[in-house]
Image (cartoon, rainbow, N blue to C red):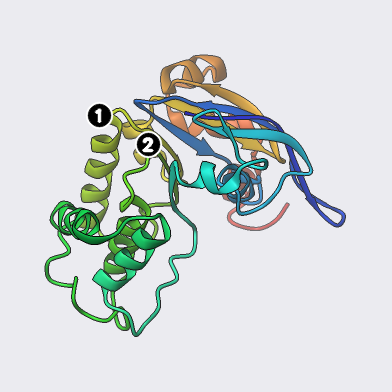
Amino acid sequence: MIVAEGLRKRFGELVAVAEVSLRAEDGQITGLLGPNGAGKTTTLRLLYGLMKPDHGTVQIDEVDVVAAPLAAQARVGVLPDAHGLYPRLSAREHVRYFGELQGLRGDALEQRISTLVERLDMRGIVDRRAQGFSQGERMKVSLARALVHGPNNVILDEPTNGLDVMSTRAMRKLIRGLRDEGKCVLFSSHVMQEVSALCDVIVIVADGRVVARGTPDELRELSGHRDLEDAFVKLTGVESVESLSAAGGQAP
């Protein structure tokens, strides 16, 4: 379980996160939504300890991320917004390296790698160097790195970004599978169809603040709109896209 209370983060004069509190439960998929610049990625980075908040607290399975970052990070697997791979390492070497960073060794680590290779359908790439991998292949390796230590909590930043239809379907199946195993899954996405299909709970942020939270049906009821995309626009107060469309794509 991931619990954040009163998170704030600024960079000079820019307030990236003004006031964010959220709770992502085990056995649920929690979606983090917001328009561009709303503070989603910064919030995720605060949750897994890549950044320290200026104010507020984060706990992962009741371990404080600021006070005990390594212990907290051992309990979470992260697919960040950038999937940087070392081009000269094979997929297997990437996953093995991250497993060793998490304290895994020997047969236990190799068995874990083999399980992930099968689960993520990486048989054709596992012993190839990462240089030249497609976006989908890079995503598989990055996800295997995140899951190698068997974390109870998984944070995914735009997990289907750039994937083709079949890879997207496979990713959605994997996310549901993690939820069904009782894991806490927290992910951000801009794809409303994906959010509607996957999320048990949705947290919407705008201007660095939580503006709404609830199930998809609760958010539809709160906004007065039956379509989740329309509900999102209403709850965030972002009407600029509709205004531009009505004006033929020209700024008013």
Whether residue 19 is visible to the viewer of this picture, yes or no, is no
Q: Nearer the viewer, residue 3 or 208?
A: 3
Whether residue 95 sits left or right of residue 173 in the image: it is right
Amino acid type at circle 2 is: Asn
The relative height of residue 220 versus residue 251 in the rendered view (above or below) is above
Q: Nearer the viewer, residue 163 or 111?
A: 111
In the rendering, at what x and y percent does residue 183 appear? 34, 32
Residue on which the image places disc 1: 180
Whether residue 21 is visible to the viewer of this picture, yes or no, is yes
- In terms of image quadrants, where is residue 96? bottom left
> Is the residue marked by circle 2 packed among few (<14), some (14-19), or many (20+) residues within 10 Å?
many
- The nearer-to-camera label among 1 and 2 is 2
Q: Residue 88: give its label.
A: none
* Mark found first going from the N terminus, 1 or 2: 2
Q: Residue at x 45, y 71 (%)?
A: 84
Question: How many angstroms separate mark 1 from mark 2 (CA)?
Answer: 12 Å
Residue on which the image places disc 2: 152
In the rendering, at what x and y percent does residue 167 appear? 23, 56
